[in-house]
Amino acid sequence: MTPAAIERAGGAVEHFGMPVDPGNLICLGRLGDVPALVLPGCARSPKVNGFDWVLQRLFAGIPVTGRDVARMGVGGLLKEIETRPLPRGDAPSRPAPAAPRKPRRVAAIVLAAGRSRRMAPLNKLLVADPEGRTMITRVVDNVLASHARPVIVVTGHERERVEEALTGRPVMLTHAEDYAEGLSSSLKTGLRALPDDVEGVLVCLGDMPLVPGPMLDRLLAAFDPEEGRAIIQPTFRGKQGNPVLWGREFFAEMQAITGDVGARHLTGKHADRLAAVEVADDGVLRDFDTADSLKGLVPAKA
């Protein structure tokens, strides 16, 4: 239907198909001087695929012909998209697929050291919801439901109460002695506690309890520094959210941050290494800083 739509709109189909998988169902056409594409299913995948090779050239103003597409087929197979299994190897004439790559080791840091000044004298992280769970336990439970390991919780203000709220949960606790200096001190304390062999870290905020484990796993699945996705950030309707996943290559710069700020400014500095993952829920945008913002999350008596 879509190639026919290009023609009915007054355009022409110049090439259909690509000797590369994923990306083999690409359709390349033109409406006057404007390229018109029918996207293969892999266009929604964060992994590099044949469609990316065409799109990159078009964005750079480089014409792409059918002959160009045909020449992209050297090698034939790329990394499979996560929603489709590897090529089956049960046929005698077809070699068995290579063993899947070992999952990358990504840790998580939960920042729970803040003084909750906008809700004083209450500590927002310790306010309970209708089920009796504090905000910090909800955040930590969400992170534990993901594949990020280890989970490191950075404490500061009311350290003992925060630790008590997390009793029995398999997390590493580390205390930011200088937490009063701002967010950067908590971040650096968490980074210092990371094992040497982690490839990346998911930096989670203790006041964002609406980001579930499966959503965090989508960020982990998109992380691939070798393919240019070394910083992974969720977005909702184009708006940048949290948490952000950082590759090890940025740890030194993150350790140099000072003041009451996080590492957010580094996403602009390293935009070429940033990949956005669009999500269907606004939980990645919602933090809870005031009593009014908590009304839909916690009992009125809190």
Image (cartoon, helix red, strand yellow):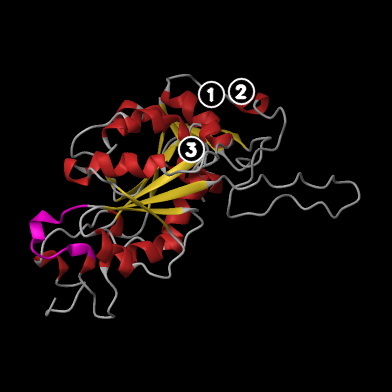
The answer to whether marks 1 and 3 mark residues whose Cβ atoms lie closer than 8 Å is no
**Magenta-colored span:** 114-125
Determine if residue 34 is in view: yes
Q: Which amino acid type corresponds to the residue marked 1 in the rendered image? A: Val
Is tag 3's residue or tag 2's residue first in the polypeptide sequence? 3
Looking at the picture, does residue 181 appear above or below residue 269? Answer: below
Residue 295 location, x and y as percent? Answer: 14, 72
Q: CA distance from mark 1 to mark 2?
A: 6 Å
**Residue 123 among magenta residues:** yes
Q: Quadrant of residue 190?
A: top left
Marker disc for residue 64: 1
- Amino acid under label 3? Leu
Q: Which mark is residue 37?
A: 3
Which residue lies at the image location 28% right of the left edge and 44% below the top edge? Answer: 186
Relative depth, front residue between 27 and 244: 244
Percent position of residue 98, x then y: 76, 44
**Is 190 included in the stretch rendered in magenta?**
no
> Quarter-wise, where is residue 207 in the image?
bottom left
Say which residue appears at 61% left-offset and 23% top-offset. 68
Q: Residue at x 35, y 67 (%)?
A: 166
Q: Residues within 10 Å of mark 3 (few under 14, many from 20)?
A: many
Q: Amino acid at mark 2?
A: Asp
